[in-house]
Image (cartoon, rainbow, N blue to C red):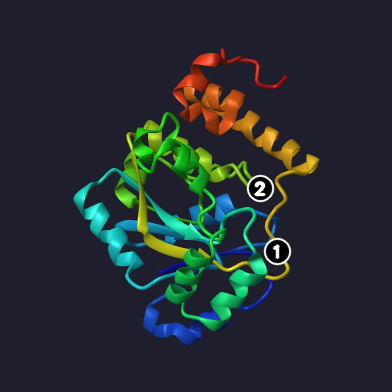
Amino acid sequence: MVVADDGSAGDIGAVLKNYRDLHISYCRQEDQGFRVAAVRNLGIRNALGEILVFNDNGVLLTPGVLAQHKKLHERQSNLVVLGNMFGTDWKADTDKIRQLLEQETVSDAIAAMKRLGGMGDGREGYFSRFGEDVAAWYIPWLALWGGHFSVRRDFLDQNRIAFDEHFTSWGGEDNDFGIQCCRAGGEYRFARDIEVVHYPTPDRPNSDITTKEFKKHYKEVKTYIANKHRSEDTRVWYEIGSAANDPEKREEILPRHDYEK
């Protein structure tokens, strides 16, 4: 296991000494702002395993998750496995999620979230519209959210895939990584049975995607990705977003090449 630290203020190394039986490798980069792309690359360089399971800080695993990833990758070498991330819906009640996770086991908390509703994976809207067979989507990389997913190391090494360290603020680095995996022949698999949950820290509520600031930032992210890859699928995504996965919507638009306008 590798803990890659993006410049935490606390002494994370000292905390990890309490878990020696887990054989944790610790690596840290200096705090120069939000550099999740760079720290994930740091984690990749320090990892020794054949299968890389990326798991964001605060994402809690149910028992058997790692074994499930291993089983899938043993069957197929080019898989990109996407876990089922509870608590990532933009409108989720973060206070209730914290309460459940602080009072119950991770498995029992997820069971309660299923009963209550509204606390599931933030991509459920995509799955209901386009199906759970992500590999069949026009832009399967849209489903790659960096919170919890896995790929084989040799797949990354052979295709020279890495996170783009241009990204130094929230969003974009995971979709860009996903595009690289698609170009290399990666096949996406949403594994609903791989259940994890994001614990929302009290001082970091869910982002408000309706604000002008967020929309401006996201437009800049999309512009960078579209200009970098310059392909039909990124052009269509730039124009109509997730609707690119809808055949009828794709046919209605003529992608423009001048993304900067």
On the image, the x and y values in percent for residue 121 come to 50, 55
Residue at the far bottom: name it: 18
| Amino acid under disc 1 | Arg
Q: Does any portion of residue 208 appear in the rendered image? A: yes
Q: Does any portion of residue 12 appear in the rendered image? A: no
Badge 2 crowding class, 10 Å Cα cut-off, few under 14, some 14 to 19, many 20 or more, is some
**If the image is split into quadrants, where does the N terminus sit?**
bottom left
- Above-or-below relation of 104 to 111: below
In the figure, is residue 23 to the left or right of 209? left
On the image, the x and y values in percent for residue 75 come to 20, 51
Chain-order first, disc 2 or disc 1: 2
Query: Residue 168: which disc?
Result: 2
On the image, the x and y values in percent for residue 256 come to 61, 14
Quarter assignment of residue 235: top right
The residue lying toward the viewer, choosing from 18 and 196, is: 196
Element marked by disc 2: loop
Badge 1 crowding class, 10 Å Cα cut-off, few under 14, some 14 to 19, many 20 or more, is few
Picture residue at 46% right of the left edge, 42% below the top: 128
Q: Which residue is mark 1?
A: 204
- Above-or-below relation of 43 to 230: below
Picture residue at 38% right of the left edge, 40% below the top: 134
Element marked by disc 1: loop
- Above-or-below relation of 9 to 21: above
